[in-house]
């Protein structure tokens, strides 16, 4: 099947739902991660210090979505209506059947947990089985060991570092670690889910 471009959609999981990011999420997002430098440490944005600053960051992301550069999802734990972070499809290339998952953040209590893993699994399922993509990739800061642990748990193959790849906001350089999962590798991940080994 030819791959289809992603669009805002609700994805329901066991521990959470991913829903299209909208400005109405801003107050809860600010409560979840505003003023927390650790949450924003690996992201290409300054830590929002107010709802107004969080609103500006959300509007910037939604402008990228409107330009066809990304699709943003709010991460909402099951049984609540309050988002605790967001994630996105980005670097989307329909002709190459390739997209990335990134711009991830969740409130500190959720980082590296089953909820964090399941958010990635929902996006993988949708990318491979609904949209028909052949490759999903992630790019992480070489010092973001929590994110790399989540990707290893899922089964993402570490392809290696892109050395001195991106300048961080503080002026230092990061190496970018690339992980990927290919469509033929997805069934093995699903088997681990069925066996209760994931998330």
Image (tube, grey):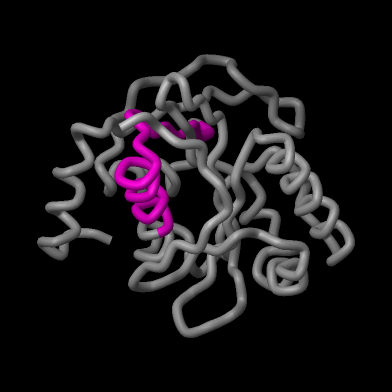
Residue 109 shown in magenta? no
The percent coordinates of residue 108 (x first, y second) are 55, 64
Describe residue 145's horizontal placement relative to residue 87 as left or right: left
The percent coordinates of residue 194 (x first, y second) are 14, 61
Of residues 172 and 39, which is closer to you in this image? 39
The percent coordinates of residue 70 (x first, y second) are 62, 39
The percent coordinates of residue 14 (x first, y second) are 33, 72
Describe residue 115's horizontal placement relative to residue 198 as left or right: right
Q: Residue furthest front?
A: 1
Magenta-colored span: 119-141
Above-or-below relation of 130 to 136: below
Count of residue discs: 0
Q: Quadrant of residue 74?
A: bottom right
What's the residue at 56%, 60% (across, down)? 106
Q: Residue furthest bottom?
A: 79
Residue 140 shown in magenta? yes
Q: Residue furthest top?
A: 163
What's the residue at 49%, 31% (across, down)? 139
Of residues 2 and 85, which is closer to you in this image? 2
């Amino acid at each position: 099947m030819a791959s289809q471009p992603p669009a805002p959609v609700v994805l329901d999981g066991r521990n959470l739902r991913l829903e299209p990011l909208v400005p109405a999420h801003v107050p809860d997002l600010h409560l979840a991660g505003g003023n927390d430098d650790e949450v924003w440490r690996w992201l290409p944005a300054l830590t929002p210090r107010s709802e107004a600053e969080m609103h500006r960051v959300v509007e910037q992301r939604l402008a990228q979505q409107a330009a066809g550069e990304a699709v943003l999802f709010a991460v909402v734990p099951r049984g609540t209506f309050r988002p605790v972070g967001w994630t996105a499809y980005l670097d989307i290339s329909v002709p190459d059947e390739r997209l990335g998952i990134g711009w991830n953040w969740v409130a500190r209590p959720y980082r590296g947990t089953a909820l964090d893993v399941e958010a990635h699994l929902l996006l993988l399922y949708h990318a491979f089985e609904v949209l028909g993509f052949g490759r999903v990739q992630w790019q992480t800061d070489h010092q973001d060991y929590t994110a790399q642990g989540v990707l290893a748990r899922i089964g993402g193959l570490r392809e290696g570092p892109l050395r001195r790849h991106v300048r961080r906001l503080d002026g230092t350089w990061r190496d970018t670690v690339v992980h990927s999962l290919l469509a033929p590798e997805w069934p093995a991940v699903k088997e681990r889910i069925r066996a209760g080994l994931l998330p």
